[in-house]
Image (tube, rainbow, N blue to C red):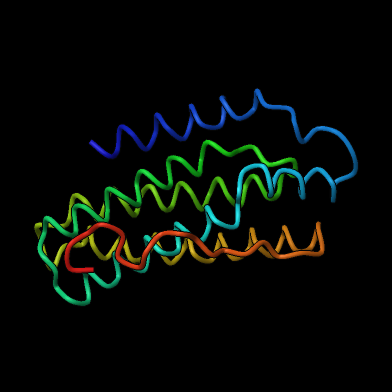
Amino acid sequence: MLAVALSTVVGLGTVAAACTSGEQQGNAESRVAAWVTDVSIGETIGTLQGDDARIATALREHLSPNTLHAVCAVLEADASSADSTLPAPDSELTDELNNAYRAELAAANDCFNGATQPASTLLTSSVVQRNRAGALLAAAMARITQITGRTPPTTTTTSAGGDIPGL
């Protein structure tokens, strides 16, 4: 289920976002700064980081498969939504974020499918993909800072556990 969404959403999000042209004017700094604000990229990255932390908590505390399914599904939805913000007005930033979102989607898929198998290699793969995504998101934030001279805040208005029981 999530694998189909992974390939479909990644492709559609990139195509749909390519049709927007609000960040096409000005120098690189002003284009990226406008895009960062328009798509709330800091909050988007913060949301993905929060999702990753909730999955880690659910695994560490051996929460129920239903809870794990829920947090994995939230990551999938948030990564799909994040993908719809691409492309960024900088190709290197677009590549870093695209790869991060793909890693988050793969992690969500492996997490969801491995939720009922506590010692699953799928859960291990999910951890690897979430760690990879975290490094790519950090690289994207560094790229934004390099271009704009400012680091967008990653704070969100979502509570630590969201609406998921046990978190």
Is 86 rendered above or below residue 162?
above
For image coordinates 10% across by 64% down, the residue present is: 64
Is 78 rendered above or below residue 4?
below
In-image side of 81 versus 163 (left or right): right
Q: Going by the picture, which residue comes out furthest to the right?
A: 27
Q: Quadrant of residue 17?
A: top right
Measuring from the top left, give residue 10's x and y in whole percent. Answer: 46, 35
Which image quarter is the N terminus in?
top left
Measuring from the top left, give residue 45's x and y in whole percent. Answer: 53, 57
For image coordinates 84% across by 51% down, the residue present is: 29
In-image side of 153 versus 67 (left or right): right
In-image side of 129 versus 12 (left or right): left
Q: Going by the picture, which residue comes out furthest to the bottom?
A: 60
In-image side of 159 versus 121 (left or right): right
Q: Quadrant of residue 23?
A: top right
For image coordinates 49% across by 64% down, the residue present is: 134
Which image quarter is the C terminus in?
bottom left
Measuring from the top left, give residue 67's x and y in whole percent. Answer: 16, 59
For image coordinates 60% across by 51% down, the residue present is: 41
Measuring from the top left, give residue 43's x and y in whole percent. Answer: 55, 56
Total numbered labels: 0
Q: Nearer the viewer, residue 58 or 119?
A: 58
